[in-house]
């Protein structure tokens, strides 16, 4: 399964825009990956829409999840 270079370029451009618009998010992720991401940790995501509706979900990380996170971190190398 190959990656479309044009789509990858567009994705990289979008990620750069996201980083510019949300500079604290990358720092947050960096802090979290320094020790909080380990087996048994719980990641919770909450989304509040403009009307005040809330959507919350969480996952408890497994060994396999940690392996996936490690693979994603190594993509940039």
Image (cartoon, grey):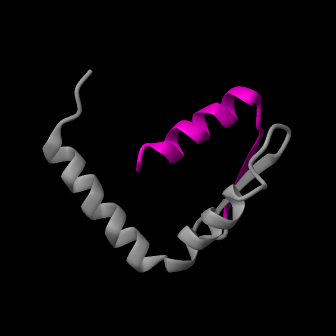
The percent coordinates of residue 11 (x first, y second) are 28, 53
Tell which residue pokes out farthest to the front in this image: 77
The residue sitting at 54% across, 68% down in the picture is 26
Q: Is residue 50 visible?
A: no
The percent coordinates of residue 28 (x first, y second) are 64, 69
The residue sitting at 41% across, 48% down in the picture is 77
Q: Can residue 25 be seen in this view?
A: yes
The residue sitting at 16% across, 42% down in the picture is 5
In the image, which residues are magenta? 53-77
Decide whether residue 33 is among the magenta residues. Answer: no
Q: Which of 40 and 22 is in front in this view?
A: 40
The percent coordinates of residue 8 (x first, y second) are 23, 47
**Is 19 rendered above or below residue 72?**
below
Q: Which of 17 and 56 is in front in this view?
A: 17
Count of number-bearing discs: 0
**Is 20 rendered above or below residue 41?**
below
Q: Is residue 26 left or right of residue 34?
A: left
Quadrant location of residue 41? top right
The residue sitting at 71% across, 59% down in the picture is 34
Quadrant location of residue 40? top right
Q: In this view, does 67 lie to the left or right of 4?
A: right
Quadrant location of residue 45? bottom right
Decide whether residue 57 is among the magenta residues. Answer: yes
């Amino acid at each position: 399964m190959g990656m479309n270079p044009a789509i990858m370029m567009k994705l990289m451009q979008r990620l750069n825009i996201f980083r510019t618009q949300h500079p604290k998010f990358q720092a947050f992720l960096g802090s979290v990956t320094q020790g909080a991401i380990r087996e048994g940790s719980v990641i919770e995501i909450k989304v509040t829409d403009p009307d005040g509706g809330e959507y919350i979900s969480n996952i408890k990380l497994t060994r396999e999840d940690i392996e996936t996170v490690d693979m994603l971190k190594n993509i940039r190398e």
